[in-house]
Every structure is written in structure tokens, then in C-alpha cells.
Image (tube, rainbow, N blue to C red):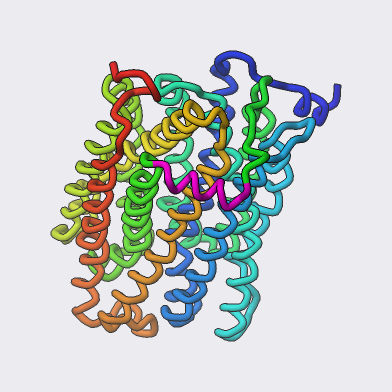
Amino acid sequence: MTLVTGIRDRRLDGAPARAQSIAFGASGFPIQLMSQTFSAFVVYFYVAHLGVPAAWVAVAMIAHGILNAVLNPVVGALSDRMRTPWGRRVPWIGLGIVPLVVAFALIWMPPALPVGGLIAWFIVIVAVYDVAFVVVVLNVSALFPEIFRTTAERASGNVPRQIFGILGMVLGTAIAPTIYGSLGWPAMALILGAVCLGVLTWSFVGGMVERSSSPSVHAEMSWRDQLRYTFANRAFVPYVLGSLMVQTSVAIIIAAIPFYVRYSLHAAEGEASILLGAIFAAAIPSIIGWSAFVRRTSPRTAVLVGVAIFGIAVLCFLWPSSVLGAALVGLAVGVGVGGLLQLLEIMLGQIIDDDAARTGHRREGVYFGVNGFVVRGSVVLQAVVAAWVLTASGFDASLGDAQPASVDGAVRIMLAVVPLGFTALAWLCFWLYPIRTSDAGRPAA
């Protein structure tokens, strides 16, 4: 039996084995590595290192966000309808891995071009990256509620995925500054790209599997009706709006930290690794605690507690004057981050189960696609906030470390106050979430 035949013929009948859960969870590592590296450093790289005006980068990021958002529901609907001997999701993932990794690396390796050429390069390469990223990540995400079927299963099965994901975030946002600081940006791109390719291949071969009983699909339903029924779901609407607010908060924080370390704390660029590392070091063990907490309560209760902890902790970034003080705040922020990473997809899986119980159809692709459509707005909001704050503060990349005093205060507001506002809106949205049980149709334990 060849490898291709083995991938085609394998199916899951019962609960996933531990080895498969770990292999599937490993996909979180390269996905988060690429995503967080992009979110954390692409604005900094093109503005501070390449000298592209912040407003131009903001326009390019808006284009990136719009394309990514549009792709999500389209790919999701196509994936739900797809029928092949390999399944609905697996072919998309297998065909998308190599283009995804190559495009990611090229973002950080632009040729010597004038400013206009750099913007054109950015738009084209990121468009390829967007298409491949959505194809791979949406279908991996759609497999999660199919492989793990209850809140208890998902709480346990999501632990390795989120731990791998946090390790990817650490490598992408905390260690990346060390790599590009010592070896340069192209070397960082090649090293991280090679790691991503290897781990994605392992995860695909060892963990990406679909169930034997193929769920029914709304083949007779038009795309317009699919979107209408999705947005009419009383649980999905507050969930997706709350998720957008949370993702925006996290994106702004990660993008602001390099500026915070350099221009507010007046530390070396590489010390951003300490602050980001503190966040993720606290998030990893907290995931196990959040897993136990959601099994004993419900996804709604656990998310409300996690969002509250995250928001209160983030505000404390206003006051530190040293990297050590900021790292202590980062530990508290990491507890909230761990909760959000662990709980949001469990909640979305619950929404999909509830929809299936009412309609008789499994529509993971559409729900993850529409969710991706909405939350990709966080990239646009992050870019707009960063461009507005930096421009209003008088930031000038050509001045190096000799920035106006106003830059310090503006960066602190961007890191602490703005994310708190988005987090408060997220908490309100999740408060309105109507499913208050542990599993769809069953009371919480």
C-alpha cells in the first residue's frame, strides 16, 4: 500500500487514539508560527526596517484582510460540498501545504525595490499566502469538531493542539526577534519555513483523518441561504462578534510589543522575546486548568471568566518601566490568553453541534469560514490602530530611538487601553451567548 493510498483509505470510527490526537494537534505549531510571526512583525518589518510609510502598509493590510475574509466562507462552503475518495477536507490540506510555506517565506525576502515596488511585492505575495493559508487552516479547523465530538473530548483533544500552537507563537513572536536580530530577516524566513513544512507534513500524515460515516451536506441549499441560516443562528452571532473583539485585542497587543519594548521601555529589540515569552510561558500550563474548568462548567461560563482575566491583566501594561516589570504583567496576560486559545473553538464546535441537532446537517466548513470572514477584520483593525497611533504620536522611523516623547504614551495606550476596550465588548457579546449547557441539548455537569 502506498502512502497516498493509505491516506485515501483511512477513516475514523470511534474516539481518536492518543498518537493521532497529538499528530493532529501538532498542526497548531506551524499555523500559529506563521500567523503570529506575520501579525507581530510584518508592520514593524516594512515600516521600521524597509522604510515604507505606515499609511501605505495600512492600505496593503486592509487589502490583505479583505481578501482573506472573502476567501473564508467561499472555501468553507466548497469544502462542505466536496466529495472525493480522500474525503472533504484532506485533499485541500494536502495540496495547500507547500504553497503556504513558500509564500510565507517570500514575505520576508523582498528583492531590492523602491517603496512602490515593495508595496506591490507585499500585496502579491500576501495574496498567495492568504489563499493557501485559508485552504489549509480552515479545513484543519473543520476537522476538529468532526474528530472530537463532545465538550469533554474537545477539551482534552484541544490541549495538545493549543500547546503546540503556543509553542509556535513563542517561536514566531518571541524567538523570531533573536533570529532576525542575529542572522537577518531572510534567514529567519528560511528557518521558520523549513520547520513549518516538516511539522505540517507530520501532522497531515499522522493526524488528518475523516470519519467513516460521511455527514450530510446542504447540497440543495443555495450559498445565499447557507449564509442567511448561519447569520440567523442566535448562538453564532454573539460568538463571532465576541471572537472578533478578542482576536483584535490579541493582534494589537502582539503588534504593539516590539514598539513598546524599543520606544517605551528603551530596551534592545531582542528583549521583546522576554515579554512575549512570559505571556506564552504562563499560557501553556493554564490550558490544562482551563480544560478542567470547562468540563466542570460550560463553554459560556469558562469564556466569560477567561475574557475578564485577560482584559484586567492587559490594562496593567500601562505602568511598567522595565522589561522585567512588563514580563510580570505578561504572566497574568498569559493566563487569559491560554483560556481564549483553549475555549473559543470548543464553543464554536458546540454551535455546530446545536445547528446539526436542529437541521440534521453538519456544516463545519461554512461556520469556520464565516467565522474566519468576520475575525479577519481583526487584521484590518490592528493595522488601522497601529497606523493611526504611530502617525498621531509623531513616530518617524528615520529618527531611530530618538522619537518624540509622545510616542511612549501613545504606544502604551495602543498596548493597554485600546485592547481593554475591545475586550470589554467581547465580554458583553459572550454574555449574550444563549447556549448555557456543556453540550448541545444536555445540561452542564
Going 55% across and 84% down the picture, which residue do you hit?
Answer: 115
Q: Main secondary structure of the magenta part?
A: helix
**Would you place residue 265 above or below residue 283 in this image?**
below
Which of the 4 image quadrants contains residue 265? bottom left
Residue 253 image position (x, y, % from top left)? 32, 57
Residue 268 image position (x, y, % from top left)? 33, 64
Which of the 4 image quadrants contains residue 315? bottom left
Does the magenta run of residues contain 188? no
The span picked out in magenta is 222-233
Does the magenta run of residues contain 229? yes
Query: For this rendering, which residue is in front, 387 or 266?
Result: 387
Going 33% across and 69% down the picture, which residue do you hit?
Answer: 385
Residue 38 image position (x, y, % from top left)? 49, 59
Going 30% across and 36% down the picture, which residue do you hit?
Answer: 434
Residue 137 image position (x, y, % from top left)? 57, 45
Quarter of the image containing the C terminus? top left
**Residue 51 visible in the picture:** no
Instruction: Name the residue furthest top.
Output: 14
Q: Along the horizontal axis of the image, is 12 left or right of 237?
A: right
**Would you place residue 116 above or below residue 366 in this image?**
below
